[in-house]
Image (cartoon, grey):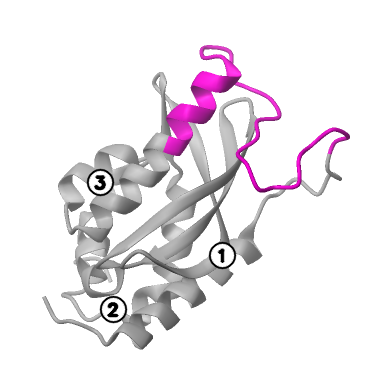
Amino acid sequence: MTSFPRFYRAGAVIVVALALVACGSDDDSETSAGEDDGTTPTTEATDTTLGAAESEAAINEATTEFFRLTGQGDFESAVALMENGQDYIDELEHCADLVEGASVEMKTVEIDGDSAITTFAILLDGEEALAEAGGGATFVDGEWLVSENTFLSLYDAAKDSCTGPPPADA
């Protein structure tokens, strides 16, 4: 695997994270009374199968584990934590050099039925590259997964900087 200098990778991570923050939520509603200041994970609503605390924990676990596995290059395991993940192995391998050493630190979770909006810090080799990025999760077949749209937003923002073999359908 080709190693990108740290500042190139950090720059790519920041560009990707900014794209995610810009994508944000389709929900333009104001924050609800009683919400915290965003420094601790929060839950607004929940799916009908799991309780709020269980859902939040499952979303935190899926998101942090997805990024940890991706940062370690374990794409086969990572895609199991992503909605339609098997469809994107080639894209993950294409950007392997950019995601090397990446991880996240979860900040907030806002659940609305079978979908959730998340915010997290993106870390690169354990150091904060971006303090607040965003993404989503979706409840599929009884489990919370990183949303396909979260991955596609990341990939679309980063793909021109990736140096691995391009996906077959590119």
Count of labels in the image: 3
Indicate left or right for 170 with 144 as reference.
left
| Type of the residue with mark 3 | Ala
| Type of the residue with mark 1 | Ala
Q: Nearer the viewer, residue 169 or 34?
A: 34
Range drawn in magenta: 32-60
Q: Secondary structure at mark 1?
A: strand
Indicate left or right for 126 with 117 as reference.
left
60 in relation to 170, above or below: above
Q: Nearer the viewer, mark 1 or mark 2?
A: 1
Q: What residue is drawn where x is 68% and y is 25%?
A: 45
The Cα–Cα distance between marks 2 and 3, rounded to whole angstroms, is 18 Å
Q: Secondary structure at mark 3?
A: helix
Q: What residue is drawn where x is 52% and y is 12%?
A: 49
Please tell me the numbered disc located at residue 105. Answer: none
The numbered mark, 1 or 2, whose residue comes first in the sequence reads: 1
Q: Are marks 2 and 3 in contact (CB under 8 Å)?
A: no
Quadrant of the image containing the C terminus: bottom left
The numbered mark, 1 or 3, whose residue comes first in the sequence reads: 3
Q: On the image, numbered disc 3 is attached to which residue?
A: 78
Image coordinates of residue 169 in percent, x first then y, are 25, 66
Q: On the image, numbered disc 1 is attached to which residue?
A: 131
Quadrant of the image containing the N terminus: bottom left
The Cα–Cα distance between marks 1 and 3, rounded to whole angstroms, is 23 Å
Judge whether residue 156 is colored magenta.
no
Q: On the image, numbered disc 2 is attached to which residue?
A: 162
Image coordinates of residue 46 in percent, x first then y, are 62, 22
Judge whether residue 56 is colored magenta.
yes
9 in relation to 125, above or below: below
